[in-house]
Image (cartoon, rainbow, N blue to C red):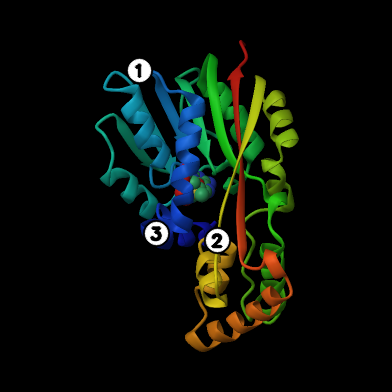
Amino acid sequence: MDTTVAFFDSFAAEYDSWADGLHQRVANRLVELVRPLPGERVLDVGCGTGLLSNRIAELVGPSGLVTGLDLSMGMLEVAHAAAPANAAYQLIQLEDRLPFPDASFDLVTFGDSLPYLSEPFAMLEQARRVLRPGGRIGLSLRQRSMATAAQRAFYRVLDEELTEAHPLVVPRFHSEDHGKLGEPDVIRELLEYAGFRAPVTTQLLTGVRMTSGLDWIELLQGVGPWPHALLSTLGPDLRRQLAAVVEREMETLDDDAYRYHEAFVFVTATAEDW
Ligand SMILES: C[S@@+](CC[C@H](N)C(=O)[O-])C[C@H]1O[C@@H](n2cnc3c(N)ncnc32)[C@H](O)[C@@H]1O
């Protein structure tokens, strides 16, 4: 968990503009899909810099209320700086409970946050509990199986050049299972088990293309806690050496070189009656 906090704290100022504003595009799409209505009470789990919460707060208006939860003070400071009066933020490390009474929200959102949580299924059940019957849930998740050849090659290089040779063991932030949460069949089934009906998934493919090994390393440092922990510790010499290895790998990929994709899956569903 410390790696996650350290990553989001240090990355907070860049988060909204990273990869040409990818997080903003994804948050905007999720807001469109969950269609917040005036007067609604909304919970945003893992709210980060408030890209979702602050926009939703505008849409629910002064008679509505948005509560954003996050464990990174750095992210919450950015959220708070742009918050309308009806958006409230709480610093909290979530485990397997949401600290709210039953049926206290009309809408719960998880914007690219579910796989980071230690107990994702428990959190879906909790979302069901704190939603009123007929309330909605909306999630965005990365579909990791859609990574490009360049991304896969880079993670192989990281393993070979850094993890195996690194004196520090940097824990990966989640298990293989958490990585599968973004597969449409998996998340639909989990939502049904957790007490939601009619889950609907849509996708958004977004990405950028870099032109050099150093730019590629700079971009990938923002992908998540594990690459950030490894890459941010490199001095200029090691960084140049790694960039040279990356450039050799990319030369073998022709048109696929330096292609970075994020495929996002969006899911919306309705809380069943008790
Ligand atoms: C990729 S960011 C997504 C931020 C925002 N929801 C968005 O759509 O841009 C994931 C967020 O989840 C938060 N997070 C991760 N683990 C958490 C936990 N156990 N409890 C609370 N927040 C957590 C991180 O601090 C981070 O801000």
Find residue 15 and report its horizontal and vertical position in percent.
42, 55
Check disc 3 and report the residue beneath it. 14
The answer to whether residue 154 is left or right of residue 41 is right
What amino acid is labelled 3 in the image? Glu
Density class for disc 3 (Cα within 10 Å; few <14, some 14-19, many ≥20) is: few
Residue at horizontal 49%, vertical 84%?
A: 235
The answer to whether residue 63 is left or right of residue 164 is left
Discs 1/2, front: 1
What amino acid is labelled 2 in the image? Pro
Residue 160, picture quadrant:
bottom right
Q: CA distance from mark 1 to mark 3?
A: 31 Å
Secondary structure under tag 2 reads helix
Quarter of the image where the N terminus is located: bottom right
Which of the two labelled residues, at mark 1 and mark 2, occupies the earlier sequence position?
1
The answer to whether residue 142 is left or right of residue 192 is left
Whether residue 195 is visible to the viewer of this picture, yes or no, is no
Q: Identify the disc placed on residue 38.
A: 1
* Residue reaching furthest to the left: 85
Residue 241, picture quadrant:
bottom right
Q: CA distance from mark 1 to mark 2?
A: 36 Å
Q: Identify the disc placed on residue 225.
A: 2
Residue at horizontal 61%, vertical 69%?
A: 170
